[in-house]
Amino acid sequence: MTWRYLIKQLAFPPSSLLILLLLSFFLRQRWPKTALVGFILSVSGLYIMSLPITVEYAARSLETEAPLAIQQWSTLSQQADAIVILGGGRETNDPAWQADQPSLMAMQRIRYAARLAKASNLPILVSGGLHFGQPPSEAQIMADTLQQDFGVTARWLEGESRTTWENAQYSAEILKAEGVQRVVLVTNAWHMPRSRWSYEQFGFAVVSAPVGFLSGANGRPFNGWLPESKAMWHNTALLNEALGSFMYKLNYRAP
């Protein structure tokens, strides 16, 4: 798991672009033209990846699932048997809480799912594994947050998965045994197409409930052409999602 994390961080921006920039610096005397190309590519890449306008347009290509209409919430029990919330990361050992807490992205999913559960009375499964092998699982953290902050009890906890595919695989083992065939799937809008596809591979009928859209107008001065550190994070997540969606359809099929 540590090696996978290391390789991923080095292969994706900003690390990959910073490495290219360093290589360009060291090659500037021996291969000046190559160094110049590397310098231009790395600086241009860092600039593009730091722009809110890039987030807006990149997200539009990934956020293909429409949001649920609020009027649909109370009728979800006619379309599905359960709500599934996918883990979205954690903040480790938050001093304010003296425990691990859901990330801001995970909280978006939890809050939305809690609202859907109260409107529809559907049971909830939370799905998310350990952090580098260390408990508690994301599923446990989400279940605790649902109960303590929203007064909603998660019926099932799937705490072994490390990837979106495993979210679907291990959720299927739990839900199929309970006769659940139709699920309302809650995750971020840009993550929804890959998530929906994964769950459908295991035979689920999926009602998409995307949240946390990034494709709306960025609302920044100068239309989002000034760099922001937050945009770098968003663009890296979107790039990872685009590559993940492509690789999943090449490499994964349900048994």
Image (cartoon, rainbow, N blue to C red):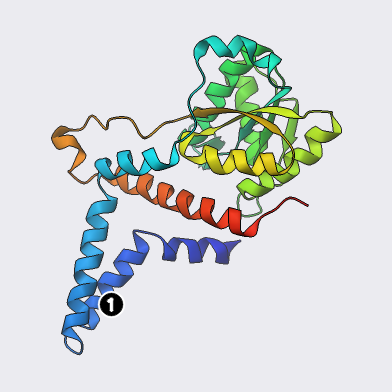
**Where 181 sits versus 89, above or below?**
above
Residue under pointer 1 = 23
Foreground: 42 or 143?
Answer: 42
At horizontal 27% and vertical 32% (from top left) the residue drawn is: 218
**Where 246 sits versus 99, above or below?**
below
Foreground: 19 or 208?
Answer: 208
Q: Is residue 201 left or right of residue 227?
A: right
**Where 160 sits versus 112, above or below?**
below
At horizontal 48% and vertical 55% (from top left) the residue drawn is: 243
Foreground: 140 or 243?
Answer: 243
User: Residue lying farthest left?
Assistant: 222
User: Residue lying farthest bottom?
Assistant: 30
Q: Quadrant of residue 157?
A: top right
Residue 198 visible to an observer of this rendering: yes
Name the residue type under label 1. Leu
Q: Is residue 13 left or right of residue 220?
A: right
The image position of residue 72, as x and y in percent, is: 57, 13
The image position of residue 23, as x and y in percent, is: 28, 77
Residue 135 visible to an observer of this rendering: no
Which SS class for mark 1?
helix
Q: Is residue 66 left or right of residue 229?
A: right
Q: Quadrant of residue 184?
A: top right
At horizontal 25% and vertical 70% (from top left) the residue drawn is: 21
Q: Residues within 10 Å of mark 1 (few under 14, many from 20)?
A: some
Quarter of the image with the N terminus is bottom right
The image position of residue 64, as x and y in percent, is: 46, 35
The image position of residue 245, as x and y in percent, is: 53, 50
